[in-house]
């Protein structure tokens, strides 16, 4: 979320409240701590701020700095970054200021939460304290997780470092010249916060019904907690706030980062632990059998998007509130206006790469480079993984009942490099967009969207990656399902290898390294344009320097493959920088190597 939207978001975030008017602009009002203790609305404003600047990008942005895409927005900071301007004082990927700001407010909140008068009734007061502390612990771990992804790395001393772990609020008397904790110390403190959150929070926020009093946790029931009081604190009105289930998913994400090649040597976490953390989340939906059969296309499940009375989409662990506004900061129309092809009144901003298109296998499961695949270079989109057509618009695709011609033989502005809004790669984005939106200024039809923060597919893929490291493709520890089981289910759901038994999958299930490559490729495909690829490539220590390629169809049967954008990254940029201004100010703050 962009900082310019923080204060607007602080207003919108009130929709997350468990009680009416729970979030008020405490930050903008100079209330003393004593006043805050008597006014819980203002105290919760501190926690509300941590929600208001959650680290999730609500729109697809970061993939244009990877081999999956480019943008035709020549003013984009991601273009200049990719072309060699990434530095410690020019970092579009920085999380430093926003995360540290959120953490400061969380620490302030934790410093007062037990002294605030949330209720005059003792048991209700205890429940409020537990719930709000649990939220704060999990939120602090989440903000640190993004801070660690962006700024953890090997310091100039050669030690794998994280960030300064501040567990108390800073004030005018604080020593700001503090050193970075080791990466392992950061991970341990984050996992401790998440464990505390899981102990304090319900798995999900649901209203208990009359006759279900036995489901009230014993520690509250034994103190006489009434059903209405429990529902007030832990009931459905708190839906979409931090819950035990969400904290478990974040724990799995933190552990996967820790066992990744870039960090595994100094993280203190094992692959077995990472796999087991993810398994906890997945067992809540009965493992592989609980995988949403439409989870790879959740964004076009319009009946659920438009009518949440039907219940949430099974693919979603955590989401934000839905919206159908037309403003540029809103999700209701902006992604479509930004990414539709020009003939559909879009700006064509995100252009999928030939690199990504080539990563989709054939429908029979074989990579297109395999002689057994049946790939036809003259008809490169025929017989492909169905996800390709679901995620990418290519030359000749039909979208919104129109044929999109991306080749230079075309006569419209959809043709490659025709105008500033045209594709640079020969492809347009389709994933995440609603076909029933209309950016035509005379119509301007928005539809409901909601930001997805965590998907079950991501946790399935995290499990597969860690389980393969721990036990090989077919091992499962004590979890009852393996990396092979997960990848097979994901591919079958997509329609890959469904009719022939997926012989390619079967051929690699006996080789741990080959299976790791398959898992990475499935993660690339399933999570494309969801702002994951940049971080994945760095934690896997993959080169960011692969040139982005595209295709120009000179005629409907004559593809010419082109190089669209060279990339200029250095090996040390596997780890992001500490902001130069911070290193210049504080002598104890060690920079990462190379920056």
Image: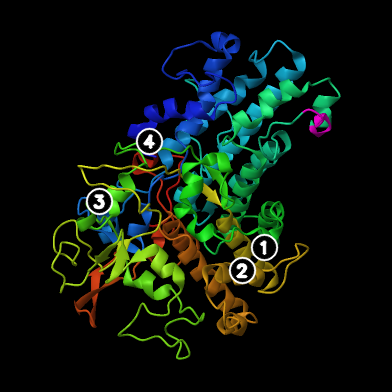
Q: Which residue is mark 3?
A: 76
Q: CA distance from mark 3 to mark 1?
A: 40 Å
Q: Which residue is mark 2?
A: 489
Judged by depth in the image, the label closer to the viewer, 4 or 3, is: 3
Residue in the image at 43% along x and 14% along y: 29
User: Alpha-carbon neighbours of circle 1 within 10 Å: few (<14), some, or many (≥20)?
Assistant: some
* Mark 2 residue element: helix
Q: Which residues are magenta?
A: 210-215
* Mark 4 residue element: helix
Q: Which residue is mark 4?
A: 585
| Earlier-in-chain disc, 4 versus 1 | 1
Residue 399, picture quadrant? bottom left
Q: CA distance from mark 2 to mark 4?
A: 51 Å
Left or right: residue 331 versus residue 232 is left
Q: Nearer the viewer, residue 303 or 101?
A: 303
* Mark 1 residue element: helix
- Residue 85 can be seen in this image: no
- Whether tag 1 and tag 2 are in contact, CB under 8 A, the answer is yes
Q: x and y percent of residue 480 in the render?
A: 76, 65
Q: Which residue is mark 1?
A: 288
| Earlier-in-chain disc, 3 versus 1 | 3
């Amino acid at each position: 979320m962009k900082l310019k939207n923080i204060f607007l978001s602080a207003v919108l975030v009130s929709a997350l409240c468990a009680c009416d008017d729970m979030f008020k602009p405490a930050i903008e009002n100079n209330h003393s701590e004593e006043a805050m203790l008597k006014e819980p609305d203002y105290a919760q404003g501190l926690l509300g701020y941590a929600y208001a600047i959650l680290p999730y990008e609500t729109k697809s942005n970061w993939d244009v700095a990877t081999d999956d895409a480019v943008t035709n927005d020549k003013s984009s900071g991601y273009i200049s970054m990719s072309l060699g301007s990434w530095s410690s004082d020019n970092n579009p990927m920085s999380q430093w200021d926003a995360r540290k700001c959120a953490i400061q407010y969380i620490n302030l909140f934790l410093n007062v939460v037990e002294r605030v008068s949330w209720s005059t009734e003792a048991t209700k007061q205890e429940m409020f304290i537990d719930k709000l502390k649990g939220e704060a612990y999990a939120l602090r771990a989440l903000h640190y997780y993004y801070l660690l992804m962006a700024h953890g790395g090997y310091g100039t001393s050669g030690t794998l470092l994280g960030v300064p772990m501040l567990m108390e609020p800073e004030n005018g008397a604080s020593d700001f010249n503090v050193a970075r904790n080791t990466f392992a110390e950061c991970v341990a403190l984050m996992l401790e916060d998440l464990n505390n959150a899981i102990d304090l929070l319900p798995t999900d926020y649901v209203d208990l019904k009359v006759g279900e009093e036995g489901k009230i946790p014993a520690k509250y029931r034994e103190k006489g907690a009434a059903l209405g009081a429990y529902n007030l604190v832990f009931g459905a009105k708190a839906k979409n706030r931090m819950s035990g289930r969400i904290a478990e998913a974040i724990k799995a994400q933190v552990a996967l980062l820790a066992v990744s090649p870039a960090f595994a040597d100094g993280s203190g976490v094992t692959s077995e632990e990472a796999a087991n953390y993810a398994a906890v989340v997945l067992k809540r939906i009965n493992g592989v059998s609980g995988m949403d059969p439409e989870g790879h296309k959740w964004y076009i499940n319009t009946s659920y998007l438009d009518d949440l009375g039907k219940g949430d989409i099974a693919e979603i662990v955590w989401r934000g509130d839905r919206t159908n506004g037309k403003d540029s900061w809103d999700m209701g129309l902006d992604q479509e206006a930004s990414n539709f092809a020009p003939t559909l009144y879009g700006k064509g901003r995100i252009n999928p790469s030939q690199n990504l298109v080539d990563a989709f296998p054939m429908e029979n499961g074989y990579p297109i480079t395999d002689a057994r695949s049946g790939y036809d270079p003259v008809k490169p989109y025929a017989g492909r993984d169905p996800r390709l057509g679901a995620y990418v618009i290519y030359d000749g695709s039909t979208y919104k009942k129109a044929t999109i011609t991306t080749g230079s033989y075309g006569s419209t502005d959809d043709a490659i490099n025709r105008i500033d809004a045209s594709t640079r790669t020969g492809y347009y984005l389709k994933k995440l967009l609603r076909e029933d939106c209309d950016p035509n200024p005379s119509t301007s039809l928005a539809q409901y969207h909601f930001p997805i923060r965590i998907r079950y597919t991501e946790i399935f893929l995290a499990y597969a990656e860690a389980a393969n490291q721990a036990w090989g493709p077919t091992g499962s520890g004590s979890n009852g399902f393996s990396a092979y089981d997960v990848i097979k289910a994901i591919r079958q759901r997509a329609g890959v290898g469904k009719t022939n038994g997926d012989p390619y999958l079967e051929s690699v299930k006996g080789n741990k390294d080959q299976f790791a490559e398959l898992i990475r490729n499935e993660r690339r495909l399933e999570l494309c344009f969801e702002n994951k690829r940049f971080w994945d490539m760095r934690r896997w220590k993959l080169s960011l320097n692969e040139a982005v390629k595209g295709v120009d169809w000179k005629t409907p049967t004559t593809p010419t493959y082109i190089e669209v954008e060279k990339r200029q990254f250095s090996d040390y940029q596997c780890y992001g920088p500490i902001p130069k201004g911070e290193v210049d100010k504080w002598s104890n703050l060690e920079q990462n190597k190379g920056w």
